[in-house]
Amino acid sequence: MRMSLPRYSIVLLSLLLVSVFVLSACAGGAPAVEPTAAPAVEPTAEPTAAPAVEPTAEPTAEPTAEPTAEPTKAPEATATTEPTKAPEATATTEPTKAPEATATKAAVVAAVATATAVPATTGEWAPRQLEATLRGSGATFPNPLYQVWISVYSKNVVPSVKISYQSVGSGQGQKDFIAYLTDFGGSDSAVSSSRVAAEAPDAIHIPTVLGGVMPMYNVPGLAAPMRFSAETLVGIYMGEIKKWNDERIANDNPGVTLPDMDITVVYRSDSSGTTSIWTDYLAKVSGTWKSQVGSGNTVKWPTGIGAPGNAGVSSTVQKIEGAVGYVEVGYALGAGFTLPFVKNAAGNYVQPLLANVSAAAAAVKPSSDVQKLATSITNGTDAQAFPITGFTYILVRKDTYTDLNKAQALADFIYWGLTEGQGAANRLGYAPLPENMRQAAMRALMSVRVGGQTVLTAPIK
């Protein structure tokens, strides 16, 4: 059947309109790549002193996503005996596989940009272009930062050095390190002096950054961040405060209508440096806690349910209304939670903003002994200090590395992290080291030797 000219024209016009509509829709679609810049978790300019009282605006939270650099998968470590000395990281047993870390994808992208914005080389020092494979395991607390450091360093600075870090918790990281399953360990708590003497006599704790550990809570309907005194946090974790409208919580939050809701306490089920920081604080502010529960990587909790890693605690609190847990600040921000206020030793309610976290370490005086740099800074006396704050450390060996090339590659990487890599800390919610502690860390790193030969000579800057 032949189509008349007018009908033929109408068909052509219709096809043209449909084509224009499709092309317009495609042109308006979202880009398929990540933006090169991301909104910062912290303000772009940190105040020189954080306010002792609540700010009028809450910090911006970012959506949860995985870090851009994933650690290499490894089977669990099950070594039952720990040699006093062995070739480093040559055992066939791998360190324990890490649970997934929670970090904001936008913050990680921004942190990578921050790290790469600083030249990897300076006129005074540059990492050696060595070829090595390095393995580490340990604390979940600094894992988002370490993954950014590893990604930038291995891709842009020394591509021939391959580094993996498994975030399995400080306790397992210490165990892997002492058993020579790894080249370096990550820990938020110090290896005990008795264990160092018996099993790791040349262990050095290299501080890398510091961060806050905060109560993370899931209480619907609250317009403003909650406030917690030390007595309230002890009461909650002792199991004595069971409802969110308990008068002790109400006294911390005057004028706030609190729900008649049960409190579900969440704690770390693994051996954890974050737990060590949290319980160290509770033991300092409460004689009852110190005598009945104590402090350390693991304790016998009076109440609650356990979850592995900072990511596990964060996820559990998100799922249970009425839950409260303790996590490193970056994990709470990654989950979109607001920063609470905690009453410090000076009587001020402060948030774990970078300036407040840094203030907790303001009075620290590093030891002249490179093997005694680990120190507690919870419940600091500075008026602006966030009271639940701690350093995190990379564990290295002072004298028992046997592979000079690997030891040099590791020393270069850590030195880079203590200098150029510090720029990424702010974007992920960590506070850079105080200058005196950073310089002490570099001096400790330069005490590492293989067969009597110093592995790193670099400026203290």
Image (cartoon, rainbow, N blue to C red):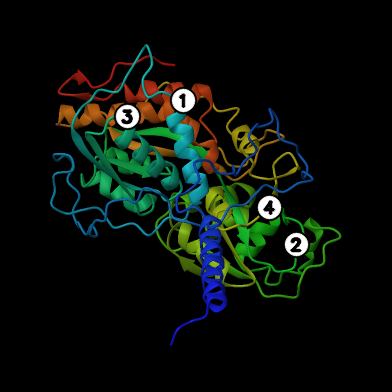
Of pointers 1 and 3, the one earlier in the residue sequence? 3
Q: Which residue is mark 3?
A: 157
User: What's the residue type where badge 3 is placed?
Assistant: Val
Q: State the residue lying farthest toward the bottom.
A: 1
Q: Looking at the image, do the residues carrying marks 4 and 1 touch, with CB atoms under 8 Å apart?
A: no
Q: Residue at x 50, y 36 (%)?
A: 425
User: What's the residue type where badge 4 is placed?
Assistant: Pro
Q: Which mark is nearer the camera, 4 or 2?
A: 4
Q: Residues within 10 Å of mark 4 (few under 14, many from 20)?
A: many
Task: Residue 190 in the image: state x and y as whole percent.
Answer: 41, 41
Q: Which residue is mark 4?
A: 340
Q: Residue at x 45, y 54 (%)?
A: 32
Separation (CA) of disc 1 from disc 3: 21 Å
* Residue 438 circle label: 1
Q: Secondary structure at mark 1?
A: helix
Q: Which residue is mark 2?
A: 249
Separation (CA) of disc 4 from disc 1: 28 Å
State whether residue 430 appears in this view: no
Residue 31 or residue 263, whichever sits in front: 31
Task: Residue 167 in the image: state x and y as whole percent.
Answer: 36, 52
